[in-house]
Image: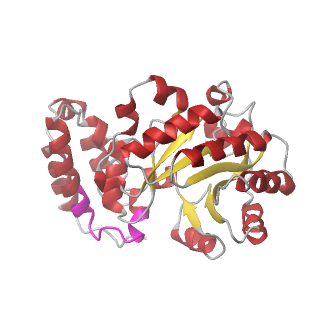
Amino acid sequence: MMDWTDRHCRYFLRQVAPRARLYTEMITTGALLHGDVARHLDFDPAEHPVAAQLGGSEPAELAQCVRLAAQWGYDEINLNIGCPSERVQHGAFGACLMAEPRLVADCVRAMRETSHLPVTVKHRVGIDKIESYDFMRDFVATVAEAGCTTFIVHARNAWLKGLSPKENREVPPLNYEFVYRLKREFPHLEIVMNGGIATWPEIEAHLAQLDGVMLGRAAYHNPWLLARDGGQSQRATVVQAMHAYARRECARGTALRHITRHMLGLYHGHHGARRWRQMLSDAVRLATNDPDLLLSALDTVESARPFPAAA
């Protein structure tokens, strides 16, 4: 979710789902150690519980980044071993690290020794043409020996060459059974499912066998999907909270468009959704940087006609 789940996105999703655990976009060790730390790590206290997701392969550098994230007050550190992007591979991290479980274990060990924060790992079921359950099982077993107890599994192989990141989320077939089998073999570990999940019946089916479900783009494009997780009962409540947030942020110099771009899917699937998106994407109105645009859009959509019950 690089360039997607920034702090404005996370604050918005927190209004929808008070209990969900939120994750930052993947932050590379280089960006954090040599860039603007505050830009990468700042977050609103309302976002808790929130995890910092890191990308890297040097144990010492990852340990430094964990130290920074702990100072900023994060609740969890997640090491991303699932990203198939060639840009990430050129940095020798991401999904290609599944082929080096001992190095990943060294990274996890160094990260855990730096802070009391839990260190979790996100990975795929395999890479390229390796479609053996044993490959994933041995990876998890090796990393678990370093003290990792939570594994978030994207239930697709990552093709390191020939597919774009988007295609890597859609083309390799889903293999949920491998993830279920992993939980059966390692009942003491927390196993979380990720990949291809877009409805509550699917979520509940996975939760019957696993410890959790991670949603990505499905929740971004249809945020109200998260409202079943103890979320707000009315979209209007969320918009009003975001209006107050936008007022504070715009007063600090934040461009309103950086906030509204994450809210376009709030009325997904309902009458008025198109008008909502149009108003929140209106370049002329966004240029005024007036947060009242949110209230105008809310009034327009909510007064159009009663909505059907949410699915």
- Residue nearest the observer in this picture, 75 or 24: 75
Residue 16, image quadrant: bottom left
Q: Residue sitting at 85 percent across and 42 percent down? A: 129
Residue 302, image quadrant: bottom left
Number of numbered tags placed on the structure image: 0
Q: Residue 14: image x %, image y %? A: 34, 57
- Residue nearest the observer in this picture, 85 or 45: 45
Q: Residue sitting at 37 percent across and 63 percent down? A: 17
Q: Is residue 169 visible?
A: no
Q: Residue 7: image x %, image y %? A: 35, 43
Specify whether 142 is left or right of 230: right
Q: Quadrant of the C terminus?
A: bottom left
Q: Residue 235: image x %, image y %? A: 27, 62
- Residue nearest the observer in this picture, 217 or 43: 43
Q: Residue sitting at 39 percent across and 31 percent down? A: 37
Whether residue 6 is situated above or below residue 287 in the rendered picture: below
Whether residue 91 is situated above or below residue 308 in the rendered picture: above
Does the stretch in magenta take in 211? Answer: no
Most extreme residue toward the front, as rendered? 113
Specify whether 236 is left or right of 309: left
Q: Residue sitting at 20 percent across and 48 percent down? A: 245
Residue 57, image quadrant: top right
Instruction: Specify start and end residues of the magenta stretch as a single range.
Output: 226-239
- Residue nearest the observer in this picture, 113 or 58: 113
Q: Is residue 114 visible?
A: yes
Q: Residue 24: image x %, image y %? A: 45, 45
Whether residue 210 is situated above or below residue 130 in the rendered picture: below
Whether residue 146 is situated above or below residue 176 in the rendered picture: above
